[in-house]
């Protein structure tokens, strides 16, 4: 998987490339919507997390335990 994270004036822009072979393993269907969440952990020099940025559940803790807090990924 390849990614590029760019800081913008009001946040970040993330470009993510997932190998198509990985997507085929999931049987994703064009035109369908799937629950999706993305989290990025930011760590200090000691490797401990100091912050976590999330795509959809910005202020909702427990997103990893509750898909109801996820956003929608639409396959085109």
Image: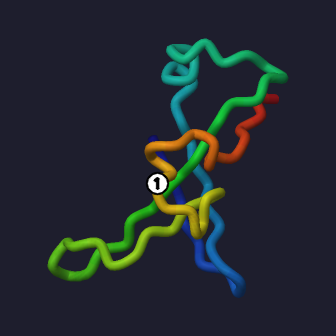
Question: Residue placed at 52% from the left, 30% from the top?
Answer: 19
Q: Which of the image's four quarters has the N terminus? A: top left
Apparent side of residue 59 relative to residue 64 in the rendered image (left or right): right
Q: Secondary structure at mark 1?
A: loop
- In the image, 57 versus 41, the foreground residue is 57
Quick check: 28 above or below 62? Answer: above
Question: Residue placed at 56% from the left, 62% from the top?
Answer: 60
Apparent side of residue 24 relative to residue 1 in the rendered image (left or right): right
- In the image, 52 versus 12, the foreground residue is 52
Question: Residue placed at 62% from the left, 73% from the top?
Answer: 12
Q: Which of the image's four quarters has the C terminus? A: top right
Q: Residues within 10 Å of mark 1 (few under 14, many from 20)?
A: few
Quick check: 14 above or below 1? Answer: below
Question: Residue placed at 66% from the left, 18% from the top?
Answer: 28
Colour scheme in use: rainbow
Q: Residue 22: percent from the left, percent from the top?
A: 49, 23
- In the image, 48 versus 62, the foreground residue is 62
- In the image, 8 versus 73, the foreground residue is 73
Q: Circle 1 is placed at which residue position?
A: 62
């Amino acid at each position: 998987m390849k990614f590029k994270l760019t800081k913008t004036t009001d946040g970040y822009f993330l470009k993510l490339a997932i190998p198509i072979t990985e997507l085929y393993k999931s049987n994703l269907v064009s035109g369908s919507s799937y629950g999706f969440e993305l989290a990025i952990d930011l760590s200090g020099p000691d490797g401990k997390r100091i912050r976590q940025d999330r795509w959809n559940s910005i202020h909702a803790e427990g997103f990893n335990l509750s898909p109801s807090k996820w956003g929608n990924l639409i396959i085109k």
